[in-house]
Image: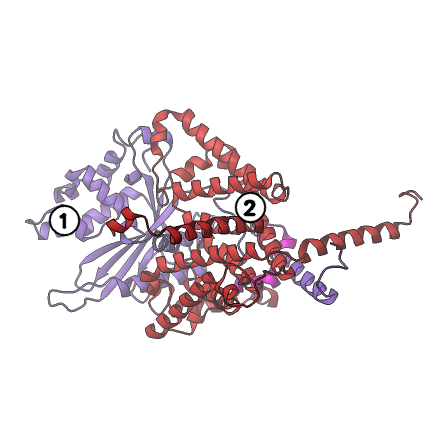
Amino acid sequence: MTALSRPPALWFSRQWAALSDGWNRFWFTPADPTTLGAIRIGTGLMLLYIHLGAIADLSHFVGPEAWIDPAAVGQLKTIGQDAPDALDRVARGWWGQSLWFYVQQPALLWLTYGLFLTAVLCFTVGLFSRAAAVVVWAGHLSYIHRGFITWDGMDSILAMLTLYLMCGPTGATLSLDRLRSRSRQTERSWAANVVIRMIQVHMCVIYLCAGLSKLQGARWWDGTAVWMTMVLPEYVVVDLSWLAYGGDWLCHLVSNVGVVVTLGFEISFAYLIWNRTMRPLLLFLAVLLHAGIGLVMGLGAFGAVMLIGCLAFVAPESIRAVVELFSQGLGRLRRNGVPTQVRRAA
Amino acid sequence: MTTESLPVAPRTRRAVTLIILLHFFAILTAVTSASGPGFPAPVLAVLANKPLRPYLELTFLGSAYRFFAPNPGATNVLWFRVQYLDGTVRWLELPRRQDFGTRTAYQRHLSVAMILNQYLAPPDEAGRQQLNEIGQICLASYVRHVARTIPRSGADGRPIAVRSVGVYDAFHALLTPEQIRAGRVPADLQNYKALFLGAFKPDGTRTDPFRPGTQDKPISYVAAGILAVDLYPLVKRQPAADPRQLADDLALPEPIRHLLSRYPELLDPQAADRDLQGRIEVLMSGPTAGPGGKT
């Protein structure tokens, strides 16, 4: 019987079965949680960096004297409540929640923030990972929602990573929990796979949206957008304005190449990253793009967080190989002791 | 591996599948329901997004991920003019890199300044512009924060309360290669455009006659006002003091300090006797201003 002579219902049922089988294998095939462990460590380190980096300014973002004070929080919560339509009230309302809406006393505020930072530390080293992951997710969201206007791109990526990491066995490997457990073997887990897949799909959404939305901008079409990002006065770290003295053609060349690489990478990431041959090239371009943005514009934390998300595409074997190399180096250092000149200097 | 050999019970698989589909459907509505200039969002996406806002907002997953899109544009900082009950004045420029020990702290304060632009409603037919409801709440809160956290002590060491706070949104334009070759630097006054956001009591109540609108002011007008109203009276009262030091004590915004260092003749209060704004405009369009130098 040829395909054309088959009843359409049978054709549809076979396609449905194939689709369903593919879906189940994509999401539910057990996976090595090592990749997840690496993402957990990276996310934890970045959370420590950004939260400790602004700890001296905590009272500007959280508490009774914050840029958005409790009176303003109260007013913001009432926005949209007068809309006649129930759906509009839902859509226009502010649904952010924060522990620090309720904690205003400075001592209590610092105590809760200290507990949050302790949870981030536990999360990073993989101690009581499950509980720590929940506290970290809730704490980071509380911080963003309470600040209201102090967040930027890296916070939305971290919100995504902490949400997913909370749902998987992030402490199953590369963790103190692992060392404490009696079992010596890392078990593959379908939950680990679900979480890794969710991060992968979400990273594709992020890059695709970032790329496609740039196509609405005239500066990305005329090729000058990258020049503009290189001279943003409030961002630049490395001054590249000297390029202007090389002539317009040099500025246009640098900017146009930057635009082509950025758009090409961001738009194609969503589909080329699934190709095993192209994957290393895409990940290399991700490092190149984010390192460039970090060096020139000072958005290193944002770049690092994006690269941590990209770790979801790195095979667990590669991560274990890096960990192995690292522990070998550490072991060699321990066996040979500290080099003599370092000891003398100390 | 076939579906049958997967170590997940069918019921669990179906439940997780449903959660994944709902979750990514919510993300899809978030990224498609954001309008861009000249690119309105599809009505269906906006409608589908409405009931999902609580979930997306609570989890902070409602971003449309439009980094530097549609175009990288001018950044902006905020200028606060804080006047105390004893008549003294102090300016606050938010943010200044040198005020922050870490990049993260600077970045967070830059967000405080830049996010106000998102709340600027489009101009009406008469060209008037104003902050939307969220923007007005935020701005009033900023004013209260500044009034509380920028203290001044009198000669007896007792704190002097704030009388009023004026706020400007200062847009900082990007330089073209041609302007850089002509000698322009980012701190040049002509790179700035000032939007007066209002004058406030320390409790955040707006008091100026333009409320609730904003006022687009020529930057030369703002600079002339700062020099004539805040700096020159101080220089006249303390003739023995170094005017540069007095300008530093006022913590004037960077482009004003840059203007004074480039044109020290403007430190002389006699300058106020003539057409100060016109003079600043002439200086701004001078030989180092480059093409299109006038704001």
Q: Which mark is residue A207?
A: 2
Residue labelled with disc 1? B245
Q: Residue A172: x percent and y percent? A: 55, 62
Q: Residue A90: x percent and y percent? A: 57, 66
Q: Which residues are magenta?
A: B41-59
Q: Image quarter for residue A183?
A: bottom right
Report whether A266 appears left or right of A189: left
Helix, strand or loop for disc 1: helix
Count the labels in the image: 2
Chain identifier of the residue bearing label 2 in the image: A
Chain identifier of the residue bearing label 1 in the image: B
Q: Residue B81: x percent and y percent? A: 26, 55
Q: Colour of chain A?
A: red
Chain letter for the purple colouring in the rendering? B
Q: Image quarter for residue B133?
A: bottom left
Q: Nearer the viewer, residue A63 or A76?
A: A63
Q: Amino acid at mark 1?
A: Gln
